[in-house]
Amino acid sequence: MNPTLALHGGPKAVTAPRPERHRWGAEELSRLTAMVGQKSLFYANGPQCADLAAEFRQTCPAKWLMPTSSGTAALHVAVAALQLPPGSEIITSPITDMGSVIGILYQQLVPVFADIHPHTYNLDPQDVRRRITSKTRAIMPVHLTGNPSDMEAIMTIAREHDLFVIEDCAQAWGALYRGKPVGSWGHLACFSFNEFKHVSCGDGGIVMTNDERFGPTLAKWADKFYDRNSAADARNPTSLAPNYRMSEPQAAVAAGQLTKLPAIIADHVRLGSRLLAQLETRALPGVSLPAIDPRDRHSFWFCLLRLDLARFRCTRDEFAAALVAEGAAATPGYIPRPVYRYPLFQNHDFFAGFWPLREAGLTTMDYRRVSCPVTEAVLADSISLAINPGLTDEIMDQTAAAVAKVTHHFAR
């Protein structure tokens, strides 16, 4: 390969054509066609929501589940179902989407951010232990990028301290931890059908549980706490709950997507594994690959690499720009900063400029003093590489070649 970077006039490393990807087809269309013939598009007793539930159970065993309007909504429902007193703390990851913490804040609870493992990018169980206080009531591990969290360690901590566990599986469709699907380890689990996830209906989610303490109330927490199974007393809510229902059109597309999930995940796993194998065969001084336990299945929502910037004559952003010039689908980092560094956390501006919990003396949390050094380092030195079924084995091979080319050019 010509070592001259494409940025400097050399040939691109990634030249394979990218096939146009169309995610929806006959499976979704047939269900949408049937849906148009229905007398009602309401979720309760709707055939599309019922089909979605049946398809989901082929992926992850769930005694109780509730389709929701988004993955964020599913997480809010899960948090609400715990019925924790105001000021209770839930430990979660600082490298995640806001959707992981919105429900915590709206339920007048306190997100506590624990640091992550430097190469799995998931919660570090030892730091979770350090963050536990007398107010801790739950842990919310996030299976970031499709790499399963260390659920044995997390569940051990939960048992020792009598804590609940909510799994955030939004990025981890099809991932397996010790041979079991993610989502089947904690007390509750949530998945996302957002546009950018493995499977999508534009937006939507599912919350599930096998715990009889929470299962019978899941639908209520997503539906204004109405009891749709009681025709005589449906509108008689005994708790405050939002409207997070999924409609039948959304469910029709989501159910169609789930019929294709095994093939979709197989593509993600094949492409991600091939990319890592290709990277491992090359001498890449200063580049760290994600750590994956061989007993688990990483479902590769994307691939996150780390750079030891002291070993390069460039910044992280310059490295990413060089990869893009080579034709690689690469972006610098993941989210721009840890969640606790977002302005609303730094200003404690959660409710019209106020945080009632602090003002009522129910928490002393000050997010301006929170520090998760590993998270901050990962977000400062990482590179994201795209993985999706619209790519090919040839593109993965050439992407690995592009990483090697850029690495050797900038290596000190």
Image (spheres, rainbow, N blue to C red):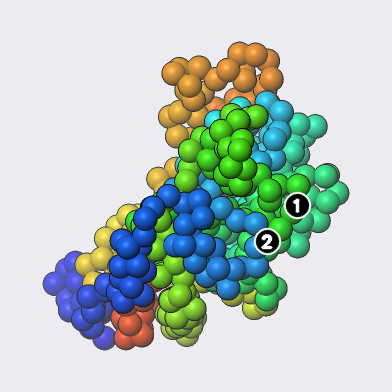
Q: Dot 1: what SS?
A: loop
Left or right? Give the position of 133 relative to 120.
right
Residue 140, percent from left and from top? 64, 48
> Is 134 rendered above or below residue 188?
above
Q: Quadrant of residue 54?
A: bottom right
Q: Quadrant of residue 403?
A: bottom left
> Is 310 rendered above or below residue 258?
above
User: The N terminus lies in which quarter of the figure?
Assistant: bottom left
Q: Which mark is residue 212?
A: 1
Tell me which amino acid carries mark 1: Glu
Left or right? Give the position of 99 relative to 81.
left
Residue 278, percent from left and from top? 44, 83
> Which is more toward the observer, 9 or 222?
222
> Which residue is at a point 68% across and 76% down the rendered structure image?
179
Residue 364, percent from left and from top? 66, 21
> Which residue is at a point 64% across and 78% down the rendered structure image?
294
Q: Dot 2: few (<14), some (14–19), or many (≥20) neighbours within 10 Å?
A: few
Distance from disc 2 to disc 1, alpha carbons, whole Å, reads 9 Å
Tell me which amino acid carries mark 2: Lys
Q: Is residue 21 visible in this depiction of the protein?
A: yes
> Which residue is at a point 47% across and 57% down the rendered structure image?
46
> Is 17 rendered above or below residue 57?
below
**Which badge, 2 or 1, is on the more N-terminal residue?**
2
Q: Are marks 2 and 1 in contact (CB under 8 Å)?
A: yes
Q: Which residue is mark 2?
A: 63
> Which residue is at a point 40% across and 56% down the rendered structure image?
248
